[in-house]
Image: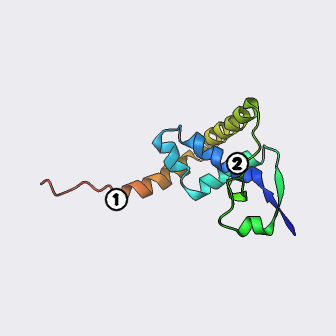
Amino acid sequence: MKTLVNLTHQSVLGEIESVLDTYPYHYQQAFALSDLRQELITFVLNRVPRIYKAVSEEQIYLPDLPEESLLSHKLPRSPLGQQIHLQNLIHQGICSIMQEKSDWINLHLCETVQTGCEPSHWFG
């Protein structure tokens, strides 16, 4: 029996990681928050076509498959223009979410930073 697997999702996740690695730490910190990360994933996935692959159930569950196994599958090699388009969508999503949610982001990032950032009294 074959199962359909969404290759687009896996590929988009990898590309989001790559793009976020080029951003300043503040952006990376913001998109480490699961709500914002999911919002960015949704933003991009809603704007790209889905690619599915039919795989056997054995391919899904066998841990010692060769490199072309399900876990290492990405979208088929696309022309440079398509990759740039995907990266541009990710940049647009980051910009849009940061603008739309700036107050929420500042509140949540400040909460996580301030809890451990008390000034030290050790020095006197």
Percent x, y for residue 109? 47, 52
The residue at the far left in this view is 124
What whole-number distance in Å separates the C-alpha atoms at marks 2 and 1? 35 Å
Left or right position of 15 against 20: right
Three-letter residue code for mark 1:
Gly
Percent x, y for residue 4? 83, 61
Secondary structure of the residue carrying numbered label 2: helix
* Residue 55 badge: none
Residue located at (66% from left, 52% from top): 39
The quadrant the N terminus occupies is: bottom right
Up the image or down, 86 lies above or below 7; here it is above
The residue at the far right in this view is 1
Earlier in the chain: of badge 2 and badge 1, it is 2
Pointers 2 and 1 in contact (C-beta within 8 Å)? no
Label 2: few (<14), some or many (≥20) within 10 Å? some
Residue located at (53% from left, 41% from top): 21
User: Where is residue 64, by image quadrant?
Assistant: bottom right
The residue at the far top in this view is 81
Three-letter residue code for mark 2:
Ser
The residue singled out by tag 2 in the image is 11
Discs 2/1, front: 2
Up the image or down, 17 lies above or below 57; here it is above
Up the image or down, 52 lies above or below 99; here it is below
Secondary structure of the residue carrying numbered label 1: loop
The quadrant the C terminus occupies is: bottom left
Percent x, y for residue 118? 29, 56
Percent x, y for residue 116? 34, 59
* Residue 116 badge: 1
Q: Which sits in the foreground, 35 or 48?
A: 48
Up the image or down, 48 lies above or below 6; here it is above
